[in-house]
Amino acid sequence: MNPRSKLVLQQKNANLDCVEELAAIEKEAHFSPWAKISFIEALQANDTVKKFILDNEVVGYFVAKIVLDQCELLNLTVKKSMQSKGIGTLILLQLKELCMALNIKYIFLEVRRSNATAIKLYEQNGFNETGIRKNYYKTVTGMEDAILMGLSL
Ligand SMILES: CC(C)(COP(=O)(O)OP(=O)(O)OC[C@H]1O[C@@H](n2cnc3c(N)ncnc32)[C@H](O)[C@@H]1OP(=O)(O)O)[C@@H](O)C(=O)NCCC(=O)NCCS
């Protein structure tokens, strides 16, 4: 049996009390992290912000903007020390389940071209490349493309 399938994540709505903790996880995990204010603004905009707990520890979260029957995945992060254990896959599955329950027809996102781990995660979960935004993200040395990806449910 795949040991990953034994992980059981608890899902909770994030609120303003969580922002500090989410921003700390974010800072450690991303090249260009969201600041605390971005989480606050997402919550104030009524975006869907879910945190995932394993053994009483927040191990990841997503932020999604749902408009009518579409969902834009704005942020998906797994705590650095907990990456590559199947948690990202489980969080994405829970996002898909939530979207199906809400009758959402399409999930879309953008990801840095250099983020091979995330691109692989999305591809393994049915997302396809739908476009490219040239030179969209800053890097240490210059700019890189954003890959647009989408999944029809
Ligand atoms: C991208 C991210 C969410 C993936 O979460 P994760 O829990 O590490 O992913 P999983 O363990 O579920 O692995 C999913 C797939 O990613 C790939 N992957 C995971 N870790 C990897 C690694 N260290 N090297 C290469 N590929 C890797 C594998 O294809 C893996 O599937 P497989 O093991 O069945 O082949 C996580 O790495 C992360 O938070 N990264 C920083 C933030 C980020 O880039 N978010 C996405 C922005 S669009």
Image (cartoon, rainbow, N blue to C red):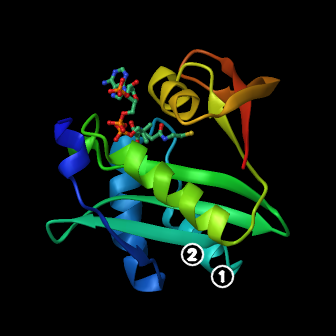
Local secondary structure at mark 2: helix
* Left or right: residue 59 compared with residue 61: left
Q: Residue at x 65, y 63 (%)?
A: 99
Q: Which residue is mark 1?
A: 44
Is residue 84 in view?
Answer: yes
Local secondary structure at mark 1: helix
Is residue 147 in view?
Answer: no
Assess disc 1: are there few (<14), some (14-19) or many (≥20) residues with their C-alpha within 10 Å of its C-alpha.
few
* Left or right: residue 140 compared with residue 27: right
Q: Position of residue 130 (x, y in %)?
A: 80, 28
Q: Are marks 2 and 1 in contact (CB under 8 Å)?
A: yes
Q: Amino acid at mark 1?
A: Gln
Assess disc 2: are there few (<14), some (14-19) or many (≥20) residues with their C-alpha within 10 Å of its C-alpha.
some
Q: Position of residue 123 (x, y in %)?
A: 57, 28
Query: Closer to the camera, 45 or 104?
Result: 104
Q: Position of residue 126 (x, y in %)?
A: 61, 34
Could you give the CA–CA distance between mark 2 and mark 1, rounded to whole angstroms? 6 Å
Query: Closer to the camera, 99 or 54?
Result: 99
Q: Residue at x 29, y 63 (%)?
A: 9
Q: Which residue is mark 2?
A: 40
